[in-house]
Image (cartoon, coloured by chain):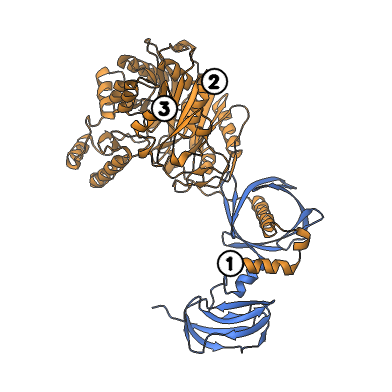
Chain colours: A blue, B orange
Amino acid sequence: MLFYIQYQGQEYKVRVESRDGQHWVAFGDEAEQPVDISYYGNDYTLLHEKGVFNANIVGDKSDYTVWRPEGNLNFTVESEYRRIVGLLRGQNLDVENNIYAKMPGKITKITTKLGASVSNGDSLMVMEAMKMENEIKAQVDGEIKNICVKEGQAVETGTLLIEIAPATES
Amino acid sequence: MKQRRILVANRGEIALRVIRACREMGHVPLAIYSKADRSSLHVAKSDGAICVGEGPSIHSYLDIDSVLKAAKTLKADAIHPGYGFLSEKAEFAKAVAKAGLVFVGPSAEAISTMGDKVMARKTMEKMGHLPLVPGTKDGLTDENEAFKAAKEIGFPVMIKALAGGGGRGMRVVNSESEFINLFRRAFSEAQKAFGDGRVYLEKYVTSPHHVEVQIIADSHGNAVHLFERECSVQRRHQKIIEESPSPFISADTRKKLCEAAVKAVKDIGYVNAGTIEMLVDEKQNFYFMEMNTRLQVEHPVTEWITGRDLVKEQIRVAFGEKLSFSQEDVKQNGHAIEFRICAEDPDKFLPQAGKVTGVSFPGGIGVRMDSHMYRGYDIPVFYDSMIAKLTVWGKDRTEAINRGKAALMDTVMNGVKTNIPVHLQLLDNPKFVSGNYTTRLIGEDFHYQESKPTPEDLRMALISAAVAAYGREYKGQDRRKANTENSLWKKVGREEALR
């Protein structure tokens, strides 16, 4: 399973799998390697070539705190699956006016109209992907400039769905 | 020695400390607790405990009637007040005596003389053993009167609460224009904290060292000192590191200070443990600041270097016995440093409350941990943020510093932010390491910086966090069955739908 971890404005990718009774980790684009990690409750001990790493790790939803004597590290951890579900629901997107399909799917319903004024978070359309229906939401306040897809249309990743003219700041 | 029933009228680490002394001596330790402290360790470790009221200390630990009622119900022979709470309230000492119980501390008269800062200054001035910092002789409530006095003393001046301690009701005023505003704040803070808004003024000695002398006396005319403690590492006028011996004062100053302190307590006929706090300037001039008529938080530092158990000695002398040692027996051996571990944001020094999710104490030679923490403990919002005292001993200061670092790194106290990172950085601060630091260390020569992990540590932390997250995704599922896209999709989808 792939995890996206945010730390101080940087994103790190860590893939974790479990087989043959141990964990395998691929850090970033590096090759997968077995890791020697033991844990009890929240306490983790990791043996690696440069030494031993101890930490107490407490996760609350996607917020993870790694407690260390020198100071804590705060991570936002998101699995690939959760990220995709989130994206489909219009969450966690970088703020952008226009909306693109983040995965392949089918537009099942369009709930907005050309020229409609929308607010951040308003539902714009419903997209079905991987057997789940997901609302696509506006990320900004503004006006619908163009609806680029039709109901029932199949879309690929990256298809422009809707163009929004953001409300000018007054 | 006859077995006594001793009620510890306190909570937290100091209650545990006193309970331990009672156990060693064969006495029966008894406890009181507030509703917020039912699951506190001092309750479990006692031989009997009674609830004295609601969480806020004014309705429990500070309620003299409730405490005395508990003492009666528990058939206590004596009350040890610890530090803080009722320990320096003369009316409490008086009420304890009136109830026919032994107060493990000085007499009510001694507390009202020396615990009241203005009275203490007058007494000290009269006796003439210790010089005073110029200041007002009476408690002030009127801001205009105070302003006039401040101008006479000359700026900068320090405003201090008459009933105070722990830095509350304390303000440094650098110029005339700030005075009224800061006076009002000190006054209202003192009123809230101690129920007594009166303040007094003192000339503010810039760059002072805070050095204090531990004394203990019995009712047979014996008074001894147990050397000094350097307490200049302070934030918001509260000590966070104390050490003994002071790395700053000369042998000559040490001798003068300690001898003057003993003379002073003998003159006032003081009995039990006490501390005389002094300011020492860069030329080793010293001034009497105040006397604490109780056990101090930092007493373990003195216990390390002298090998004397102050709490046991307090109990002995409270029951009229002689001190178990004389001045000649007290030797300074090695070096000790105490770190006050507080539940607070290391950056802004703001107190934190919450659940402690992981606890592990350091150990080994020369390491002492006084703490009431355990895994799952909920830190209540009503009391002090200090959750542990780590005290280390070394044959010299360098060994003590290195031992301190190792022990702090070995201390796990998770779930709430603590100031352990601050202590670790202080031990690397050149000014602290030099030993010649003043109360201005924090803020002037030391600035806490959030520690950056090494790339290797960050990598390991990220991997550990990913493994932790992986474990959580599969929690409660059979790993072999769960490891398919379908079931995971359903699980995540359902969970997300519930958000």
In terms of secondary structure, where does tag 2 sit? helix
- Residue B193 percent location from the top left of the image: 33, 40
Per the image, the residue denoted by label 3 is: B73
Residue type for callout 1: Leu
The residue carrying pointer 2 sits among few (fewer than 14), some (14 to 19) or many (20 or more) residues within 10 Å by Cα, namely few
Q: What element carries label 3?
A: helix
Residue occupied by mark 2? B24
Residue B210: % across, % down: 39, 30
Q: The numbered mark 3 sits on a residue in which chain?
A: B
Q: Say which label, 1 or 2, has the lower sequence index.
A: 2
Q: Is residue B32 above or below residue A32?
A: above
Please tell me which residue lies in front, B337 or B478: B478
Q: From the image, which quarter does the C terminus of chain B lie in? A: bottom right
Report crowding for label 3: few under 14, some 14 to 19, many 20 or more residues within 10 A (C-alpha).
few
Q: How far apart are marks 3 and 1 (CA)?
A: 52 Å
Q: Is residue B133 visible?
A: no
Could you say where residue A86 lies in the image, as x and y percent from the top left?
Answer: 60, 70
Residue type of the residue flagged with mark 3: Thr
Q: Mark 1 lies on which chain?
A: B
Whether residue B106 sits left or right of residue A113 in the image: it is left
Q: Do labels 3 and 2 share a chain?
A: yes
Q: Would you say B278 lies left or right of B241 here?
A: left
Query: Which is closer to the viewer, label 3 or label 2?
Result: 3
What residue sits right under mark 1 in the picture? B498
The quadrant where residue B472 appears: bottom right
